[in-house]
Image (cartoon, coloured by chain):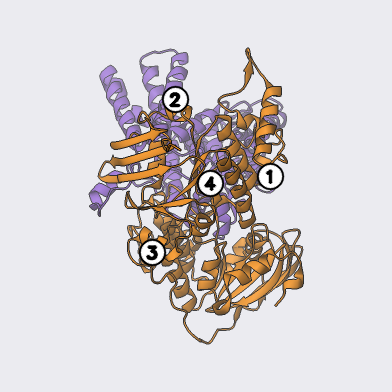
Chain colours: A purple, B orange
Amino acid sequence: MTSPGPTGVAAAPDAATPGAPAPASRAWRRIRLQEAALPVVVVLLLVAGALADRDAFLTRDNLLTVLTQASVTGVVAIGMTFVIASGGIDLSVGSMLAAASIAGGLVSDQQSLPFMLGAIGFGLLLGLVNGVAIAYGRIVPFIATLAMFAGARGLALWMSDKTPISLLRLDVVRDIGRGDVVGVPKAALVFLAVTAIGWVVLNRTRYGRHVVAVGGNREAARMAGIRPRVVVASVYALSGLCVGIAAVLLSGRLGSASPVSGNLLELDAIAAVVIGGTSLAGGRATIVGTFLGVVTFGLVFNLLNLLDMPAELQQLTKGVIILGAAALQRRDR
Amino acid sequence: MTAPAPLLEVHGLVKDYPGVRALDGVDLTVTAGQVHCVVGQNGAGKSTLIKCVTGVVVPTGGTISIEGRPLPPGDPGAALARGVAAIYQELDLVDDLTVLDNLFLGHELRRGLVLDRRAAHRRASELLRRLGHGDIGPRTLAGDLAPAAKQVVSVARALTRDARLLIMDEPSAVLGGDEVETMFGVVRRLTAAGVGVIYISHRLEEVASIGDTITVLRDGHTAATGLPPATPRAELIAAMVGRPFTEMFPDRNGDRELGPAVLRVEHATRRPAVDDVSFEVHAGEIVGLAGMVGSGRTELLRLVAGLDGRDSGSVIVDGRPLPAGRPDLAVRAGIGLAPEERKSQGLWPGWDLVRNVSVADLRRFRRRALLDRRAERAATAAQLRELGTTPADPERLVDELSGGNQQKVVLARWLLRRCRVLLLDEPTRGVDVGAKSEIYRVVRTLAASGKAVVMVSSELAELVGLCDRIVVMADGRVRAELAGPTATEADILAHALHPTGAAAP
């Protein structure tokens, strides 16, 4: 998944190239500046890390750690990619993550399977509430998910009585959060798997095409026989589902379900999607871009940590990256 | 009487773009107080000519003079200061501002630091009155105005800058027949006041009725100039296409057996736009929907396509009634709509042709839940080739295509879907003359292959030349049903303009 394959809705940047271009030049034509830029950024970060601290940074373990730490944001960002592709936004993912963790903890009865079903199921349910409010209640996504942002956090605090729930005896959940398969952390594997499935769904299924169609031109989609409301409702449910999966990963890593977890998760997820090249206006989306966006933030975080840089600097760097990516997107138009 | 220098004199204008010569020696002389029409196919150089005159682009060679004094090239400010103003096809008013604010946008009247709203209001009212439209309130939001009124405001805006040469690019594209008359009234008032007008239009009837003189552009040069407005249409078209204009419309298919009624609309009503409309369309038949803008044609098509609900009545395809407000079921039943607003409602700009064509029928490319992209590409490419789309490369972005070819992309979508009923809303709007006859040919071929076609058009010649039957609407009702081969434009107009039902044949 690390190579930037065809992202499906990639658009050629330049105007008409007369004549029949050879397949190679056509492929080249289709690579947008920004799509080429993000892999370059990732490579630069790797090189910078190697130069700064070769022994600690460019090791298999450290890179897998980056992937593992990015896995929660990553899984959520994949769901967010669908929401943004449809022309919407989901501000509630962080709060939903807390509520899903708590719901799972409450129904778990100290067992892993009920926890996972509870967390994922509740995430899906909250996402569906968002979707129905937006698609059928005709509330704009920003407001509907802002309400859920506040509401789900309140729900998490209320359900948990403001106390975290210990999950230390949930061996399977702990293992998903912290264990590994032949040295590869399971959380990283889950992230990779969600990314792969997201890529296939977005680029290779009728549903994925419909999502981007609705985001690109809702009226035209309706005339083409697509049901925009069903599609819109579904992407928020999908986002909730991803939040549920992320809740399992995070709770497993921490060994507890906390009502205050997931703070600022929505900003990280949206930032990763946007620097990846998915259009906030809808109609153009790339899962590979989102993946690279998540990895970019993960590498920056890791690198600055290794260099003992203060946390404020990480925030600052993140801001610069977002601004830079947005500037590149403008130039692509 | 000494001859004053002409208002605008363009001589030997050349503009090169990389690899293309857009203008290749254009000559044009516009006299104050006259309407100078410029016609030509898309790509003939009309837009480039305008851009040179308004200073938006720098010409490669040639001269432009206003009242005998040369205009510095590529200086929009200078052009504006010398009284050159342009009104573009896409009305560029800010919908959320009032008429007043739009009129003085960018050169607000001020007293010291604050806006002088009273003076602006006075001038706005006076200007609108001068244009014969004192009914437009300066405090109305621009977004609440009808297209024709917006155009009046655009003209007024040009006048707030003391325009002496007004360039109008396809001003009628957004207007209906009656609204065009309104605009003509405005234009005549302007010319009476000594303003020179360059009027660019695809609609040759308009050119004949509003123009004082006509210039024809072809392939970047002046093919003919100084033509009188009475120049026969066929001669104009001949000059535009560079070859004698013989056949615009393909032959009718003669007396062929019509298939069964595929689409039946019974007492369809959606007040106030559509009122008790009934008609049927047979397989292989082209039915035209004529009428003025506001007569309910577009609303009727939307209703048939399930896009809007209805108060009563039914839409029946192949004997099965369609529920209202469910376009997905209408598509499944075999209805395909090519909307008038192609770009905003029919296409995905930024997508390639493959996706634009296949979007309505992805189901057939599904192999075990996944899309077979090779099959998708092959099928859409074949469909586009069949319609003669250029460029035929299905991986081109749809934005790169001309209007006519974009229309073919929409048609290809419905052909791929094997739809049975095609609803075409102004299928040749914004399409140049050569491409129009292409579209006509395609529509005929589609009908011959058994599709039932319903076509809305404001170009009466098009309806007469193409349709087997013409349903004329006015005020949401059907006023007449005419046989295509024998109908005349005058017949249609008579019914369309008739305010009561008394005009039934």
- Is label 2 on the same chain as label 3? no
- Is label 4 on the same chain as label 1? yes
Chain at numbered mark 3: B
Q: Earlier in the sequence, mark 4 or mark 2?
A: 4
Mark 4 and mark 1: Cα distance apart in space: 15 Å
Circle number at residue A215 = 4
* Left or right: B325, with A176 as reference point: right
Mark 1: secondary structure: loop
* Placement of the C terminus of chain B among the 4 image quadrants: bottom right
Q: Quadrant of the rendered structure where residue A120 is?
A: top right
Mark 4: secondary structure: helix
Mark 3: secondary structure: helix
What's the residue type where badge 4 is placed? Gly
Circle number at residue B384 = 3
Q: Can residue B497 be seen in the rendering of this structure?
A: yes
For the residue carrying disc 3, how many other residues have a C-alpha within 10 Å: few (<14), some (14-19), or many (20+)? many
Identity of the residue furthest to the front in this view: B1
Question: What residue is shown at x 64% (from left), y 49% (from top)?
Answer: B182
Q: Position of residue B287 (x, y in %)?
A: 58, 73
